[in-house]
Amino acid sequence: MLFTTILVGTLDVATGVKVSLDDKKATVKVLHPHLEKDRNSWAVQSLESPIASIAASLLAEALSKPVVVKKEEQHRGENSIELEILNKEKKSEDI
């Protein structure tokens, strides 16, 4: 619900979002994303796409745990983002 509210409603960068979550990873499928990523960009090669960064930030905030973008793929109007959930909890002094 949080992902849909932010990505579809507030930011209007996709038409839908599906999230599957377990203890160590999450898969976020972003349907019909409106932001295209330039694979030649240094920022995208280092940080992945803006949508992947937003998804990782939302998950990290929701779980109070650090998250890493492990993989992102595009398939016919859908971005599939694999996020790794790290075991360490964020502490206020880490922020």
Image (spheres, rainbow, N blue to C red):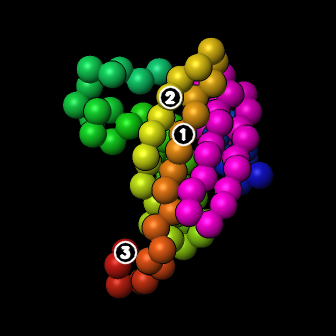
Assess disc 3: are there few (<14), some (14-19) or many (≥20) residues with their C-alpha within 10 Å of its C-alpha.
few
Look at the picture and state if 44 lies above or below 1. above
Residue range in magenta is: 10-35
Left or right for 17, reference 54: right
Q: Residue at x 35, y 20 (%)?
A: 38
Left or right for 31, reference 63: right
Are the two marked residues, 3 and 1, in contact with CB atoms closer than 8 angstroms? no
Look at the picture and state if 41 lies above or below 95. above
Sooner in the amino-acid sequence: mark 1 or mark 2: 2
Are the two marked residues, 1 and 2, in contact with CB atoms closer than 8 angstroms? no
Left or right for 14, reference 87: right
Sooner in the amino-acid sequence: mark 3 or mark 1: 1
Residue 40, quarter of picture: top left
- Residue 73, labelled with which disc? 2
**Disc 3 to disc 1, C-alpha distance:** 24 Å
**Disc 1 to disc 2, C-alpha distance:** 7 Å
- Residue 81, labelled with which disc? 1
Q: Residue furthest left?
A: 42
Of circles 3 and 1, the one toward us is 1
Residue 41 on the magenta segment: no
Residue 34 visible in the displayed image:
no
Q: Residue at x 59, y 20 (%)?
A: 75
Residue 8, quarter of picture: top right
Q: Residue at x 73, y 41 (%)?
A: 18
Q: Residue at x 62, y 43 (%)?
A: 28
Look at the picture and state if 75 lies above or below 90. above
Residue 42, position as x, y percentages in the image: 22, 31
Report helix, strand or loop for mark 2: strand
Left or right for 75, reference 45: right
Report helix, strand or loop for mark 3: loop
Q: Quickly name the residue at label 3.
A: 95
Residue 82, position as x, y percentages in the image: 53, 44
